């Protein structure tokens, strides 16, 4: 057991830190971190930030050097996430391109596809979204109904997607479609297309979330067009593409955990500064006990993540245990943000300009309800852990 | 023993529900998010026409002289649709306090106008010191040049823009640690400095009020000077009993939503309500609802008696309700999955209201201590 | 809404209370409540107590007068349970006879059966046990494998029962057997026999519980004998008998709730008397908060029981809501007894003579684990509530 | 970074497990219920032969001079089989205290004998005042006629009948509220008044010790007089880190039992592990186990460092482990159903041990306050 970083890793951290200090938008480190509210303006700024990352060689560190990456080790990825959380870096607008589409294409794409797409992903010239969920297919992706039908030398796509992140700014969509029907084996007959978002057959509508944000879209496809060259992998073998893709999603949960740790530290600070009739909350024994309880759970999840990471490094790929990380971090996010709002007492329900402490807490509390749903609900995670980690019998219906 | 509402009470519930359904249920609350109180005002007008606003007002002041329990169906139905506004503050806080402590003149001035739905009263108690206790009240009423003047700031005053008057808790005695407060009734005038605050639960409006040398007359003081906190506790018993009913109504709608959705939503080739993870989660919600309902019905019965557990029962009903309301409304979102996280579906309205009431007028530990102390333990 | 008792009900309570004061074993009310440890002696004392009840007309108050009961109302039954809990009355050794077998025979037994059995149930001359669960049939009674096969004019019974309460002292067993097989409708083909326990083919073995008690038995049947006259209802229609029987189990959960209330009051007393370094526990704010929390839950369950009872009285029979009472009271018993042990700190793990407070707490804590299992596990109760109260779709496998 | 035990540590675990399996796992603990310590003694002899008892003892005292982390596999495996006895008290409490505070003579006297498995040391700290804090320690060591005499009562002394010596916490200064205690090491003699107590967890023996004018020499005092509580905290860091490992091992066996039973037990025509109520309950147990394990591994690493979170990490590991051990062992009974409630199946052994350790040497709030205070919050 060894919790230290190697010299090489520390050098990597120092290099990134120095680069960030020079290249983050002006005033960012000092707290001037407002992003434009206007969507076009917002996406322009974030594309520019991604291009800055690209030019510094920091856009996709895990990619092979030949495709513009750094061949970064898992530990370096971890350090990368730690540093980005530390400086509260602007969001990566092409997250899906960098972390999902790119690695998948590098793995199983054709040479033409690599040539055509990879660099544009890195520079932010082409932003990607993913078209997975549908109104009737949430936890159960095999229920998808969006159909792609061959029509001469092109494919016509019809159907609806929901929860398409970045759909409103995306140029391309990594789209799951049904190309044939197998009532008994529903995961067969799925094909992944890389679809142009900018075409007459594609329409997007923002989804307004309960926290007032619109990070996701509905995407309606009416005779949207794609070609054979847009297919990832083989026709009808989309399920394999999905599995390959999931294996590349190696460290995203790490970023979540570092964010959780940061939020916990902020909660402690909140308790030290927030006063009830002049007395800081931290003097309240019940608050102290709850902080100690959260401390154990937050530290425990983080350490458990490191343990799973060690296994991942040794085995070369993540195991089903990572479902534990996802389950734990999202449920803790929810509990912690609720606690941070609750301890503020009656003024804790005031928002934005009227909030007494940092207004982020109220927003985090609302946003936390999406976390235990998106990316696989807690119920699905528990099934995965039960069946794949513990070997319990499979649920009905699958 | 008969632990159920009477047929009349249940019939009354039917009227209220039908009326609120006509207004589109939560639609009224949603319009308040858009700063549009037109339908809310119509609802209140109809409630007054149905007699709701006079239920617990004595006949001599044009009321029906009934009891807290007779208000339960109204509160439960309002809670089901999350109807905001000042019904609870008026009928379950101002009225009991006026009945018990006001002078005959004050009663004449307010009770008939409340019964007829002409006057709605808001409650200005909380302050920026985050403490709902005598020590947390810094708004001060002082005698100066032969008259009273009021100075200080109130926060989180509900629906101030709709109020015709405010029940205000102020400090009149700096020495008294246990109380030293007094209750005022201040009519809405342009002289009042009211500023809307940004609320987490956008369908429940709150405002800040700043008093700067506001002149107050002796006639505006309700009950005994320096005994305001003590008198308020009596009013809060009725308010918290009512609140628990309101929340029970809201919880019932939440459980209903979750149950019906779980019956029709299919995943993995099954209605999701067939999966025990979902089924048992809804069952836990239902159990919490039923316990909350039983506690709340009893609280509204006992508050009009002199049973030894009067306070303990009311505060238990309040804390159990506020605590479980958050829990069930959060589970409701989880059961709905992605769509439960959208603004379009009602789920979030309930979780926001739950959070609002949980943090309103004292925390769970605050009320738990009251339960234990009231039982003499 | 009206929480008062009628004059008739109060008269009933007064009559019972006076009778108990005169007829309880000597010294009982003053706290001398030791029952013999020796099993034979124990059962002799309890049979005598039941006979005392019988002679006073208090053995089976809900039975019709013509069979030796009092035609008691539900409210009178409730009062009966309240009073019995209040004086911590000795256990009713023929509980199963009085509350289950008797009412079922009165309902669907033949005249001969009524004649033969009812009075002996009342006097305690014949003690009954129930033979339901089997090693492979716990929550799912349809899985039972004990077979009864017709052999001339008698039936031969072979199989094994577990969790047979009072099996070691019982004279008769209310026994579920399989008499025919219906793979698709497993609840068919079940027949209820009233079997003699005192015969060569029947052997009982005590089950030692985790709390050291042995309230239950395993019963082994090897060519045990019964006759047609011993069948309750019809051959193969045992499921109907079971349902009829369950409808008669009207108020047992009430007794549980009154016991819970008593234990909660005792917990408050414990907190008032138990000292940490000279200071009573009740002064500890965390203990006070938890007591308030339990107060709400205990009162809430009790009030909810009254609410369900009101419905029962109005409808003439209990609804599925009673599953809520069972679920809540057993889980609260568990939480409350754990709390009572926990607040005793390090000395809370001392037992019997070394216990610092009443040693009952440690035993109640251990016994509480059986409550969420016996009489339908909490999981089964939740299914019942979900399916029968809320109308959610039925689980798989049934 | 490498968050895993080394191959050597894992290999060592294999030896211990094989050995304990040979003794029938929990059979050794069950024999203690029947007052039969023969196999327990054999287990301890074998542990000493394998070198376990000398792992963290310096080479100059015949030990292996390794670290707390190297004891983890042993503690986890002992926990898995609930092996009682004084291994933790000796190796994870007495040894660290002796190493840090004892005189060279005291070290010579005890450390080699511990390394070889000749001496096992019990811990007499708790008293009938239900308070594990300096204020709760009333056993008093006084100077009288030029010698020290000890008076008072200790309770819940573990496996006193098997101990060769006792580490005893006594008061030496009546004025000092923060400390004023001292640590003694008292060899077992017939003069000691030891009385077995009836324990809730019958496989973990405890005893009462009464001291009446017992003469104590200066050489029996470990470390500085009047600083016993402070010094003890240092030892308790090691002890609590070890305890968290022991509990992790026990929890692992509990999760294993539940998982395997859920795979084979059928009801309603299905393995019960297919029902989400059961499946998700076991998953929650597994998640708690893994978090506890991660906390405990880190605690045993950090205790031998000077990291700022050394104390916070150890006490977090302890409270998380004790709290979750009760929870998982209770769920294990529920998952087993009726058979889980019998004496025959091991379920109850774990829930009893869980309760025992949860209440041993301070409650969860006691340790939570230590966590927060140690971080300077």
Image (spheres, coloured by chain):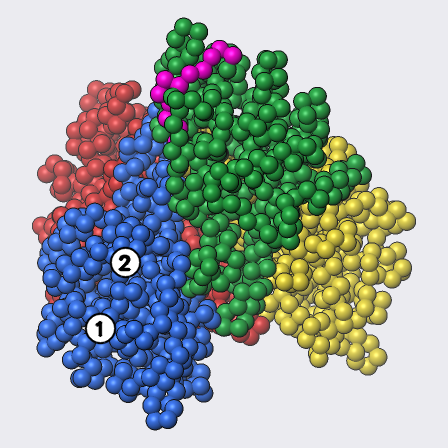
Chain colours: A green, B blue, C red, D yellow
Q: Quadrant of residue B346?
A: top left
Looking at the image, is mark 1 or mark 2 nearer the viewer?
Answer: 2
Disc 1 crowd rating (10 Å Cα; few below 14, some 14-19, many 20+) is: many
Please, which residue is most extreme toward the bottom here?
A: B146
- Report the residue at 17% width, 44% height from top: C103
Q: Which residue is mark 2?
A: B84
Q: Is residue B362 above or below residue A150?
A: below
Q: Secondary structure at mark 1?
A: helix
- Please give the name of the residue rendered at 64% of the width and 51% of the height, measured from the top-left corner: A27
Say whether residue C268 is magenta.
Answer: no
User: Badge 2, how many Cα within 10 Å: few under 14, some, many 20+?
Assistant: many
3D distance between C-alphas at marks 1 and 2: 18 Å
Residue at 58 percent of width and 55 percent of height = A266
Q: Earlier in the sequence, mark 1 or mark 2?
A: 2
Answer with left or right where residue D310 lies relative to residue C336.
right
**Is any part of residue D96 visible from this angle?**
yes
Q: Nearer the viewer, residue D81 or B322?
A: B322
Give the residue drawn at x 65%, y 35%: A53
Task: Please identify the quadrant where the C terminus of chain A is shown.
Answer: top left
Q: Where is mark 1, residue-wise?
A: B95
Q: Position of residue C378 (x, y in %)?
A: 36, 43
Is most of the magenta stretch helix, strand or loop?
A: strand
- Residue A138: percent from left, percent from top: 40, 30
- Residue A280 vertical position relative to residue C230 in the rendered view, above or below: below
Which range of residues does the magenta coloring cover?
A218-229
Kind of element beneath mark 2? loop
């Amino acid at each position: 057991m060894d919790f230290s970083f190697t010299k090489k890793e520390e050098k990597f951290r120092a290099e990134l830190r120095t680069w960030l200090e020079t290249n983050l938008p002006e005033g960012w480190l000092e707290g001037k971190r407002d992003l434009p509210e206007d969507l076009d303006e917002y996406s322009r700024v974030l594309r520019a930030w991604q291009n800055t990352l690209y030019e510094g060689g920091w856009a996709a560190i895990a990619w092979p050097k030949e495709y513009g990456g750094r061949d970064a080790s898992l530990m370096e990825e971890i350090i990368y996430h730690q540093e980005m959380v530390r400086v509260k870096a602007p969001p990566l607008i092409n997250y899906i391109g960098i972390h999902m589409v790119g690695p998948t294409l590098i793995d199983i794409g054709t040479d033409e596809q690599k040539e055509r797409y990879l660099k544009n992903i890195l520079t932010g010239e082409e932003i990607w979204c993913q078209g997975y969920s549908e109104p009737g297919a949430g936890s159960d992706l095999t229920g998808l109904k969006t159909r792609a039908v061959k029509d001469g030398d092109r494919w016509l796509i019809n159907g609806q997607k929901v929860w398409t992140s970045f759909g409103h700014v995306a140029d391309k969509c990594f789209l799951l479609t049904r190309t044939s029907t197998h009532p008994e084996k529903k995961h067969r007959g799925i094909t992944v297309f890389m679809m142009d978002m900018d075409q007459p057959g594609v329409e997007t509508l923002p989804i307004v979330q309960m926290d007032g944000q619109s990070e996701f879209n509905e995407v309606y496809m009416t005779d949207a067009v794609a070609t054979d060259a847009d297919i990832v992998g083989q026709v009808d073998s989309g399920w394999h593409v999905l599995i390959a893709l999931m294996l590349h999603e190696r460290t995203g949960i790490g970023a979540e955990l570092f964010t959780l740790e940061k939020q916990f530290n902020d909660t402690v600070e909140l308790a030290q500064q927030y006063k009830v009739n002049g007395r800081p909350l931290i003097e309240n024994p019940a608050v102290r006990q709850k902080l100690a309880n959260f401390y154990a759970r937050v530290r425990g999840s983080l350490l458990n993540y490191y343990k799973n990471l060690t296994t991942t490094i040794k085995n070369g790929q993540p195991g089903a245990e990572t479902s534990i990380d996802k389950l734990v971090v999202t449920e803790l996010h929810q509990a912690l943000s609720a606690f941070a709002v609750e301890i503020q007492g009656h003024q804790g329900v005031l928002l934005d300009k009227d909030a007494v402490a940092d207004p982020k807490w109220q927003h985090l509390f609302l946003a936390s309800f999406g976390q235990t749903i998106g990316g696989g609900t807690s119920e699905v995670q528990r099934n995965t852990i039960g069946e794949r980690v513990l070997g319990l019998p499979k649920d009905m219906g699958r | 023993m008969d632990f159920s509402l009477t047929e009349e009470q249940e019939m009354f519930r039917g009227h209220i529900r039908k009326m609120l359904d006509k207004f589109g249920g939560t639609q009224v609350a949603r319009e308040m998010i858009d700063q549009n109180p037109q339908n809310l005002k119509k609802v209140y007008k109809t409630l007054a026409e149905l007699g709701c606003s006079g239920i617990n007002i004595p006949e001599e002041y044009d009321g029906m002289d009934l009891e807290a329990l007779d208000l339960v169906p109204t509160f439960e139905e309002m809670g089901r649709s999350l109807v905001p506004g000042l019904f609870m503050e008026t009928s379950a806080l101002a009225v009991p306090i006026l009945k018990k402590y006001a002078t005959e003149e004050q009663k004449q001035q307010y009770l008939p106008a409340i019964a007829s739905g002409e006057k709605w009263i808001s409650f200005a108690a909380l302050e920026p010191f985050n403490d709902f206790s005598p020590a947390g009240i810094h708004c001060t009423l002082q005698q100066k040049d032969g008259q009273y003047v009021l100075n200080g700031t109130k926060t989180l005053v509900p629906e101030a823009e709709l109020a015709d008057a405010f029940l205000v808790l102020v400090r009149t005695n700096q020495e008294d640690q246990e109380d030293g407060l007094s209750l005022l009734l201040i009519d809405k005038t342009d002289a009042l400095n009211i500023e809307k605050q940004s609320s987490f639960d956008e369908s429940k409006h709150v405002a800040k009020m700043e008093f700067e040398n506001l002149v107050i007359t002796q006639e505006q003081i309700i009950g005994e000077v320096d005994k305001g906190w003590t008198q308020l506790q009596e009013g809060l018993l009725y308010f918290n009993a009512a609140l628990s009913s309101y929340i029970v109504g809201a919880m019932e709608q939440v459980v209903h939503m979750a149950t019906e959705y779980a019956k029709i939503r299919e995943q993995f080739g099954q209605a999701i309500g067939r999966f025990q993870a979902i089924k048992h989660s809804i069952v836990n919600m239902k159990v919490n609802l039923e316990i909350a309902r039983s506690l709340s019905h009893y609280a509204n019965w006992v508050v009009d008696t002199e049973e030894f557990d009067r306070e303990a029962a009311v505060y238990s009903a309040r804390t159990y309700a506020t605590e479980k309301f958050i829990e069930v409304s959060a589970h409701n979102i989880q059961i709905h999955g992605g769509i439960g996280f959208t603004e379009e579906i009602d789920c979030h309205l309930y979780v926001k209201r739950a959070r609002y009431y949980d943090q309103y007028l004292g925390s769970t530990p605050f009320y738990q201590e009251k339960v234990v102390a009231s039982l003499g333990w």
